[in-house]
Image (cartoon, coloured by chain):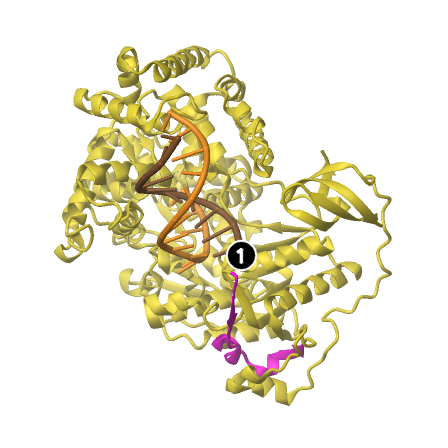
Chain colours: A yellow, B orange, C brown
Amino acid sequence: MADPFDLDDFDDGPAPAGGSHPLSAQAAAAARPDPSPLLEGLNPEQREAVLHTEGPLLVLAGAGTGKTRVLTTRLAWILAGGMAWPGQILAVTFTNKAAREMKERIGRLIGGMVEGMTWLGTFHSIGVKILQRHAELAGLKSGFSILDTDDQLRLLKQVMEAEKIDEKRHPARQMAGLIDDWKNRGLAPDDLPETEAGAFAGGRAGTVYASYQRRLKEINAVDFGDLLLEPLRLLRSNPDLLEEYRRRFRYMLVDEYQDTNVAQYMLLRLLAGKNGNICCVGDDDQSIYGWRGAQVENILRFERDFPGARTIRLERNYRSTAHILAAASHLISHNRGRLGKTLHSQIGDGEKVVLRAHWDDAEEARAIADDLEALRGAGGRLSDTAVLVRATFQMRALEERFIEIGLPYRVIGGPRFYERMEVRDALAYLRVIHSPDHDLAFERIINVPKRGIGAASVKKMHAFARMRGISLFRAAELMLPDLPARARSGLKALLADFARWRAQVDAMPPSELAETVLDESGYAAMWKSDNSPKAQGRLENLKELVRSMEEFDTLAGFLEHVSLVMAADEAADGDRVSVMTMHAAKGLEFDTVFLPGWEEGLFPHQRALDETGEAGLEEERRLAYVAITRAKRRAIISFAHNRRVHNLWQTALPSRFIDELPPEHVEVLREDAGPSGFSPSPVHERGGFAGYGGARDPGTGPLIEARAEPRRAEPCPYEIGQRIFHQKFGYGIITGMEGDRLTIEFEHTGTKRIMAGFVKAA
DNA sequence: GTGTCCGCCATTTTT
DNA sequence: TGGCGGACAC
């Protein structure tokens, strides 16, 4: 790339000098369009947040206050105004998605200049970048690999086995959690306080951590935690390097600051130094990731950390109605540890938040489904709606009901694309092709599909590899003659395959190579011959993987991208209601939001209370705040008296959060009783809810009146006796139909009534 | 080396 | 109840 400002030159050329360098300032002014139109349409606070470029700045951006707009405009302003080159801005986000979106939006504002923003990305991707530049300083070789959680666990197990630690008493999972936690706190093995080093694995947690780190270096790999920890150590122990980066990053911008953990925080402070132009954007009320290391305190003490810092509050909310905001604000005011801000709706009162009691979770699901149907009948779009739950098991009752009445839905979240077994397997093949010494990848697929190479043989190869200090792959080559016949022939074929594939790497595009590999390895065939309903989906995913590779020119390029990103979000097709966890909903918005399951024990979750007490409760409350503020026009909160958890019936009281809602902004609806007759006595026992019920005449009708005509049945493309396939239930035969509702006898899951739109011909 | 059975566990999830 | 991992038997 011919970009003269690319960061690879570390000579730290002068900034394009805002005002301090008259000549280039003039030149810049002449060459650039007037940046002031960027400010059009911003409110005074937003404008100030954009313009306050020098010195530390905290932007407290409440939900729906135009945070992203400020963020992107600010960057565009800096660039368009010639205050820094693209490569001199550090902009960090938490997710790849956020980084991508930011890039797109800036691109729309200022065009191609965004291409030079090589330091726009997640904390982790920035960490990789720094590490790649100075790998040797961190005890790594160039081209080190990044282990995902699965690889990490496998490696850790090996280490623990070598340390003779009883895995039953001290699960590797837990150990991995500890290590992760330490890394998130910026603690290398040497930094561990005595008490923590001895807290696990019979007092040898510290030892295990140290040997695990040693092993990582041996195999030239890092885990996710290292992507923060190692750069931190690097910059700490190399003042010259730190100085270089400090000079390079003229402006720093951090999104979702309330989610930073200790390591990220230290990294930022290190880079910002005393006089850095660091701008952190966040909302203390939306800090919901404490359980994975985020420290709300980081945002709470910003002004102390950066003396002379300016704080700007964005409080004009452009998303939600006044009733919704009032409900959310009143609820969150019960938290003590917060900076405090008041959201003002810019779009009017709207409807009150609806509160509804149900007999059980099935009835709750039915009510939600009915509302959605009515809403759709009235011309509303399902894609403007969402159901947000606290825990994924709540989704089951909802899904069951949605399937039953044929309501299109989409579950957001769940295992990410790159975490799916089949994708990881395929990637493992490609990784081994690319780097033969990627032991963990090789081990993953050495016997997938089965080729007669068992654990015993692999273990032997491992020992051999370690003794000789060679890779597993090399060990396999050398040991080939000494293996039992079956393993020998299987391995021999596999090694020959790899040799052939490697020879083809440069001869064909990566996607084609992937197809060849999946085909010739027998991996695709393995799933094709699998009759379980899931196999179909797995093959789809493999195809999707191949498709996603088409935009890459080299295998190396693809793999690099994949270690960090691997964004293959399923296409958002069709008009469907979204079902997701409250956590997953952060940052999203919908016209209508359903919030089921507001019961003590579930929300706030008992475990949060047990494990972190008052702090845990406050985080749950912030989660409630996040959930409510996702709604633009309508929020429907509900709870059930009886809920099936692990197939046991449990009785629950309404959530304390319900008591914390302001009665004047809430309308109480009571659904008709379930089969055994609904009596709200448990509700009345808890003071707060009784207040609502008594003061207001609870309506009984559906939440949203259906006004449109009943939907007409589409001509159905299927016939009785036809064999079909359903995503969830697998294969079946149509035994009856009534309009577009089919009765289907599934091969494995029994007879069900399903909407025609959910099945396809088999 | 592969298949099966048993016992355990069961918030939230990104990189 | 259901999914997963580990142990054990063939």
Q: Where is residue A202 in the image (x, y as percent from the top left)?
A: 16, 52
Q: What residue type is labelled 1?
A: Ala
Residue farthest toward the bottom in the current orientation of the protein = A694
What segment carries the magenta color?
Answer: A647-670
Q: Front-most of A270 and A197?
A: A197
Give yes or no for residue A609 being in the magenta stretch.
Answer: no
Instruction: Report in which chain the residue with disc 1 lies.
Output: A
Q: Where is residue A762 in the image (x, y as percent from the top left)?
A: 71, 33
Residue at image coords 29%, 31%: A133
Residue at image coords 50%, 68%: A625
In the picture, residue A58 is in which quadrant?
bottom left
Q: Position of residue A605 (x, y in %)?
A: 44, 67
In the picture, residue A240 is in which quadrant?
top left
Q: Front-most of A128 and A40?
A: A128
**Left or right: where does residue A695 sit relative to residue A178?**
right
Dividing the image into 4 quarters, which one contains the N terminus of chain A?
top left
Look at the image and tell me whether residue A149 can be seen: yes
**Left or right: where does residue A452 sit relative to residue A585?**
left
Residue at image coords 60%, 38%: A533
**Residue wearing tag 1:** A585
Q: In this view, does A112 lie above or below A367?
A: above
Give yes or no for residue A668 being in the magenta stretch.
Answer: yes
Residue farthest toward the left in the current orientation of the protein = A194
